Image (cartoon, helix red, strand yellow):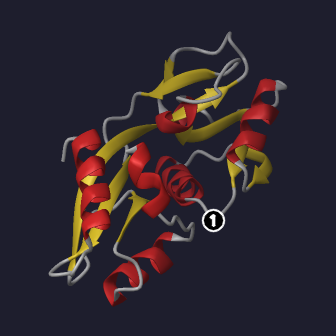
Amino acid sequence: MLELLPYLETVEMGSADLMSQIKTGQLDFGMVSSVDPIRISGVTATKIASFPFVFATGDATKPDSMYFDEIGAEEFVMLDEGFVHSRIFKRLTEISDTHPKILFQTSNPETLKNVLRDGVGMSFITALALTQNATGLKQIDILDVDMPTFDIYLLSRDRAEVGPMSQAILRVIRDEWQC
């Protein structure tokens, strides 16, 4: 993979923009996250990973697992509306009629983790976010069986004329994620 890095140009943008640019041919391929299946005419979407939503806290005395409706008295630190986490959290609070207090919102996952480490509240996040730089944080599994998952998709255009370097990069991604 390292020999391919000079040929890889990365861009970061919202999922809707990325999907549009792949469909129109501005980008050869991309990776997006979603809680819903992705279906775009002319684009192949391959799910390459799936991660559960969990609660996270800096309080080591919290239980290892909880039901969603048990968080009503908790205070939360959340990623802001630009993240799917916020939308799913809002939907789950409405379904369960559970309304915890939101103390703080941020667009920076590392800031969120630091606030939690300082002992402020809990958060609703993906297990993926706790795989890196999670020292001092406790993951609390959510016991509800009907929880959505945070899925990562590899998108590529159907019938696209992809150059040899793009083909090699796609092959590495597919091999790495076994898809």
Q: Which residue is mark 1?
A: 82
Secondary structure under badge 1?
loop
Q: Give coordinates of residue 51: x percent, y percent.
A: 39, 39
- Going by the numbered disc 1, the residue's amino acid type is Gly
| Nearer-the-camera pick, 144 or 167 | 167
Please say if 38 is above or below 68.
Answer: below
User: 11 above or below 146?
Assistant: below
* Image position of 111 with respect to 117: above or below: below
Q: Residue at x 40, y 60 (%)?
A: 31
Give the residue drawn at x 15%, y 81%. Answer: 159
Query: Which of these two is toward me, 138 or 110?
Result: 110
- Pinpoint residue 130: horizontal percent, then vertical percent: 56, 30
| Residue 76 visible, this orientation | no
- Is 161 in front, or is 75? 161
Count the labels in the image: 1
Q: Is residue 154 visible?
A: yes
- State the residue in front, 86 or 178: 178
Q: Residues within 10 Å of mark 1 (few under 14, many from 20)?
A: few
| Residue at far left of view | 159
Give the side of residue 146 with respect to residue 126, left or right.
left
Q: Position of residue 57 (x, y in %)?
A: 68, 26
Image quadrant occupied by the N terminus: top left
Q: Residue at x 47, y 25 (%)?
A: 141
Residue plotted at (73% across, 51% down): 108
Residue 71 as seen in the image, left or right of residue 96? right
Percent x, y of residue 50: 33, 43
Extreme bottom residue here?
Answer: 24
